[in-house]
Image: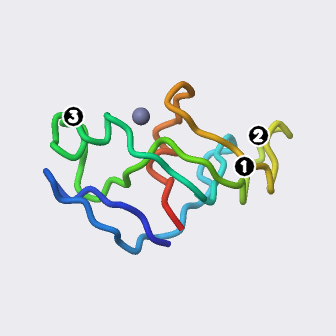
Amino acid sequence: MKALVWHGKEDIRCDTVTDPEIEDPRDAIIKVTSCAICGSDLHLFHNFIPAMMPGDIMGHEMMGEVVEVGSGVNGKLKKGDRIVVSRAIGAPKKLRKQVAAT
Ligand SMILES: [Zn+2]
């Protein structure tokens, strides 16, 4: 799949990356249909947030469709659901790393 990948300060590229996989029973994989740029993305772009590592995938505010859920999701979220991940709802770090534009 394609994703915006942070390579270093002011160096973000649209790369081909491996498809996400369910790693934890509470994981969900989302096919991104729309996304937004947030002010915090600018901080990441300029490397004001030192936690970024080369290869990290950008994006944490988006809309999309659930394509797979882990066994621990317990029916609250199911394949085919349309979802919104906004800044008001913090996404787990793993989800943020796996979110990518398709
Ligand atoms: Zn944000």
Q: Is residue 68 left or right of residue 34?
A: right
Amino acid type for the residue under numbered disc 3: Ile
Q: Where in the figure is residue 56, as x and y percent of width and height?
A: 33, 53
Q: Secondary structure at mark 3?
A: loop
**Label whose residue precedes the other's in the sequence (3 or 2):** 3
- For the point 52% across and 36% down, the residue is 92
Look at the numbered disc 2 and say if its residue's Cβ is closer than 8 Å to ligand 1.
no
Q: Is residue 40 left or right of residue 85?
A: left
Q: Which mark is residue 73?
A: 2
Please tell me in which quadrant of the rendered image residue 13 appears.
Answer: bottom left
Task: Tell me, yes or no, whether the two marked residues, 2 and 1, touch with CB atoms within 8 Å.
Answer: yes
Count neighbours of disc 2 (C-alpha within 10 A) and say few if under 14, some if 14 to 19, many if 20 or more.
Answer: some
Residue 20 in the image: above or below residue 95:
below
Mark 2 to mark 1: distance in Å? 6 Å
Residue 70 circle label: 1
Residue 81, compared with residue 21, is above or below; it is above
Which residue sits furthest top? 88
Could you tell me the amino acid type at mark 1?
Answer: Gly
Q: Quadrant of ligand 1?
A: top left
Q: Earlier along the polypeptide chain: callout 3 or callout 1?
A: 3
**Viewer-side label of 3, 2:** 3
Choose between 8 and 64: the one closer to the eye. Answer: 64
Q: Which residue is mark 3?
A: 49
Residue 101 drawn above or below residue 99:
below
Q: Residues within 10 Å of mark 1 (few under 14, many from 20)?
A: some
- In the picture, the disc for residue 6 is none
Question: How far apart are the alpha carbons under marks 3 and 2?
Answer: 31 Å
Q: Residue at x 79, y 49 (%)?
A: 81
Where, quadrant-wise, is the C terminus in this rendering? bottom right
Amino acid under disc 2: Val
Residue at 80% over, 56% down: 80
